[in-house]
Amino acid sequence: MQRMMDPQKGKKATSPQHEIEEFPSDNCCNRGLLRFQQRIREQISLVILIVVYLLASVRYFPGRVMHSMVETLIHVLSVAPINLGATLVIVAVLQRLVKERLPFSRTLRLFLAVAICLEFILGLAHFFEMNGAI
């Protein structure tokens, strides 16, 4: 390890990389911990996407809880094939561009992103229909 002299202060100056090398640590454990933290973050973000999708797909009818639940279920089942088809087209294009297969978790995230966008548009249409604007 080579240190340079700082001409202004007369002290030894170190670069950030030299500082990292000065304190040896168990890189294997650190990498394992970082991988674990990354997997936890990915799982949490996936759960958040699922919750947002479910909230966006709710069809609410004031005072009629059972009717709201049935309409939400019918809506999710009727719109899911559209979301799936759009996702498959996007995934096929992406796989053709990068020339490798997309992991399932990325495909699922893409499905949820497409579904949330579509649900937002359909939710606005439902809201305006309930208020008599359409």
Image: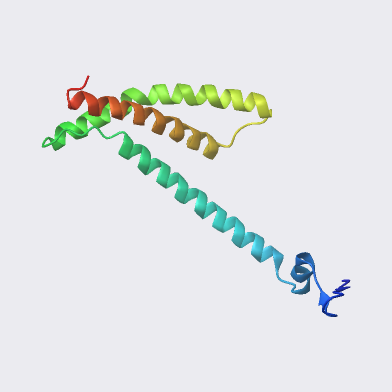
Q: Is residue 106 above or below residue 33?
A: above
Location of residue 112 with respect to 74 vertically, above or below = below
Q: Residue furthest top?
A: 134
- Identify the residue at image location x=49%, y=37%: 109
- Most distant residue in the front direction: 8
User: In the current view of this chain or complex, which residue is farthest to the bottom?
Assistant: 10
Q: Count the labels in the image.
A: 0
On the picture, is 8 further left or further right than 104? right
Residue visible at 82% across and 79% down in the picture: 9
Residue 87 appears at what percent x and percent y? 49, 26
Measuring from the top left, give residue 122's x and y in whole percent: 32, 26
Q: What colouring style does the render use? A: rainbow
In which quadrant will I find the C terminus? top left
Residue 104 versus residue 83 in the image, above or below: below
Looking at the picture, how far across and down is residue 65, in whole percent? 15, 37
Please give the name of the residue rendered at 58% of the width and 37% of the height, measured from the top-left corner: 103
Residue at image position (54%, 52%) is 39
In front: 133, or 112? 133
Quarter of the view holding residue 97 = top right
